[in-house]
Image (spheres, rainbow, N blue to C red):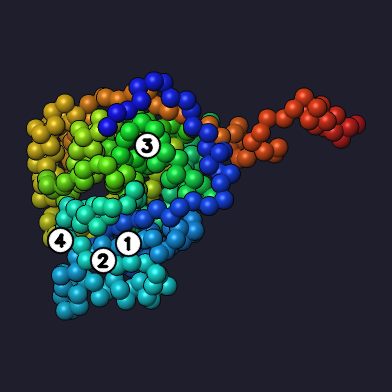
Amino acid sequence: MARKRSRLKAICFASYLQKDRYADVPMAIPSFCRETALCEQTLTMLRSYDWNMRSIHVFVDALHRHPDGVLEYDKYFKALQRHGFADVHLHPGGRGLCKQYDRIFEFFHDVPCICLMSDTVPSIQWRRRSGSAETADLPRRYLKPLVAMMFDACEQEGYAAWSLSACKNQMNLLPGHLSRKCGLLDGNFFGARVQGFAPPRFTVSDYTTDVEFTLRTWSRDKGFIRFLGATAMHTYRSPGGHASTGMSTGERADATDRAIQCMAAEFPTLLVHNKSKTCRASMPYTFVPKGGPPRMVKGLYCTKGRKPQNGWKPMSQAERTRKWRARRNASL
């Protein structure tokens, strides 16, 4: 698919805020042994942003049976009913995160685009001010416009995928930056255009699906977009989840390291395996620098991190004069 090579202008986020309604984008959530956390964190957070519960689809391992004899599907169904999320769709998925993602992309093969999210996302944080590292919850009315803006940016450049920043440290969030560099797509909240693109396949490991999705997407499309000003919060290695296979910390670290080595061998121009690092402290890989300069988002911030008093439109000379006179008279 051809992409525009010319220098692209900054995106005006204010134009997205002016729209009253947005189409409901399907939200897919793979989950395993976290029925309570799913309801209390991710689904509660999405409800606070007025996300249509009928467009949310949860995929679980329907054949998994707990030690008490209860099926995984039944546990999730009862939890959704108990927490007031009866409108959320529950689907049988695969065993393991790789099979879950394969099932999700197979299920949504005929829709224009989908969003995917982790089952333990309590909030979405953003840099409140362009000149400060202070973070806060993304404003309620910003999420849907932000998702629409990311899909539009992908369509303009011919890309299929986007994500929020994978870094949770507020010092590393970059306000208003749409990165086009090759970097980790955050598996906690990302979007994908489905129609016109071959579905990605996950074949390496359940522990490195975000790295594999990043590599296969870049290899196929030669790019993607990441919004570095916001991030989906997530507690790693929390109880349950697809990583709860009975492995010890060391065994999982070794399995992760082997998966990284396998992908570095398959994608040598995109990923470098850092043998000196240990994955018990940090992920032992580095993405090869590729991609164009960032696109900027204007209208997302002002000097003090809030909407200007007089709106987004610039004031005329007469309006500025009246404002100056009113301020002068008030000081007399």
Nearer-the-camera pick, 115 or 74: 115
SS for tag 4? loop
Q: CA distance from mark 2 to mark 4?
A: 13 Å
**x and y, in percent, of residue 50 in the image:** 49, 58
**Mark 2 or mark 3, which has the lower sequence index?**
2
Residue 284 higher or lower than 291, as above or below: below
Pick out the residue farthest to the right. Answer: 332
Mark 2 lies on residue: 91
What amino acid type is highlighted by mark number 4?
Arg
What amino acid type is highlighted by mark number 3?
Glu
Labelled disc at residue 95: 4
What amino acid type is highlighted by mark number 2?
His
**Mark 3 or mark 1, which has the lower sequence index?**
1
Mark 1 lies on residue: 57
Residue occupying image coordinates x 56% and y 44%: 17
Residue occupying image coordinates x 19% and y 53%: 102
- The answer to whether the residue labelled 1 contacts the one labelled 2, judged by CB atoms less than 8 Å apart, is yes
